[in-house]
Image (cartoon, rainbow, N blue to C red):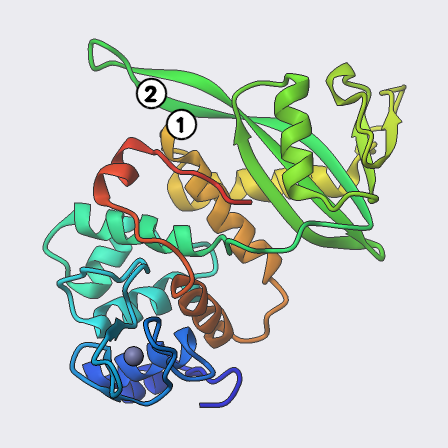
Amino acid sequence: MGMEDYPRTVLELEERFGSEDACWNYLLKLRWPEGFLCSRCGSTDNWKATRGRLICRKCRHQGSVTAGTIFQDTRKPLKMWFRAVWHVTSQENGASAVSLQQVLGLGSYVTAWTWLHKLRRAMVRPSRDRLCGVVEVDETYWCTKEEGVVGRRTEDKAVVIVAAEEKGNGIGRIRLKHIPDLTKASLHSFIAEAVEPGSIVRTDGLNAYRGLSDYVHERSVQRLQLEGEHLLPHVHRVVSLLKRWLLGTHQGAIDQAHLDYYLDEFTFRFNRRTSASRGKLFYRLLQQAMQIEPVPYKNIIGGKYNHNT
Ligand SMILES: [Zn+2]
């Protein structure tokens, strides 16, 4: 397999990944591009057993390609997962659990929903680079639905913070996060994890942004503006695309506890929006899925999700 080898069309996907073996071999190369190294004795001499296991010829230690990834312990065939990844990455506006359930013929809506959330976790690369250069940072609000004590749905406003790189006349990469409040601690820790020190950070006049000592801070105080003009145009553009996407794909029906997952999916899509090929998104998502920790179902349900970045 070459550096970036992926199916270009759904037909290629079907032809290439019709067997479990083909799927396992693809994952093996994504996980260990340089070949498997025994974690016990360091030997590179091994043989392939079933279900993506490799056995060291020297010490008989066993490695599993899916151990520690979102595919660990799955009882469904990998070719179903490959189709799920294709479905998610080939829908321009993202996939809903209902559409995934239909495409895969899954009996349960909950399974489809759980798969989507597992895949969303893979959309955030654990070791991704921070934004740099000129970065606009601003906050916005999203009304989420919360189950009330008597089962009635109440609305709550979630704070979402957005960072957008300036790139020429357009937008480079973005980072989004749901934060608890607009305190100095929340804003500064988001900037620290999203933006490379030494970068120029542009914000509005909010006092809580003051004291960004590791950055060149450009604070603009809102003055009289012409209609349609914004102090932070890049962030403003990202916010309007985000809101359109949340409303269009998910009808806005998002629990506060799960908002971060949707922000991750939007970020994944946005940062790869210039990718010419859907197949490349498929490749990236599978590649990233091989680099992360498995998520037990109860953690997804509880919305407990620790961002590394
Ligand atoms: Zn060994």
Q: Is residue 301 above or below residue 224?
A: below
Residue 84 x/y as whole percent: 30, 64
User: Mark 1: which amino acid?
Assistant: Gln
Q: Quadrant of residue 28?
A: bottom left
Residue 177 x/y as whole percent: 55, 36
Q: Quadrant of residue 226?
A: top right
Describe residue 127's horizontal placement relative to residue 46 as left or right. right
Instruction: In this rendered view, identify the residue nearer to me: 82 or 89.
Output: 82
In whole angstroms, how far apart are the C-alphas of marks 2 and 1? 7 Å
Q: Are marks 2 and 1 in contact (CB under 8 Å)?
A: yes
Q: Earlier in the sequence, mark 2 or mark 1?
A: 2
The residue depicted at 77 percent of the width and 18 percent of the height is 206
Say whether residue 302 is visible: yes
The residue depicted at 49 percent of the width and 52 percent of the height is 124
Q: Secondary structure at mark 1?
A: helix
Residue 269 disc label: none
Name the quadrant where ligand 1 sits: bottom left
Instruction: In this rendered view, identify the residue nearer to me: 157 or 124.
Output: 124
User: Mark 2: which amino acid?
Assistant: Glu
Q: Quadrant of the C terminus?
A: top right
Q: Is residue 38 above or below residue 103?
A: below
Q: Secondary structure at mark 2?
A: strand
Residue 146 disc label: 2
For mark 2, does the 10 Å Cα neighbourhood hold few (<14), some (14 to 19), or many (20 or more) residues? Answer: some
- Ligand 1 within 8 A of label 2's CB? no
Which residue was labeled with disc 1?
256
- Ligand 1 within 8 A of label 1's CB? no
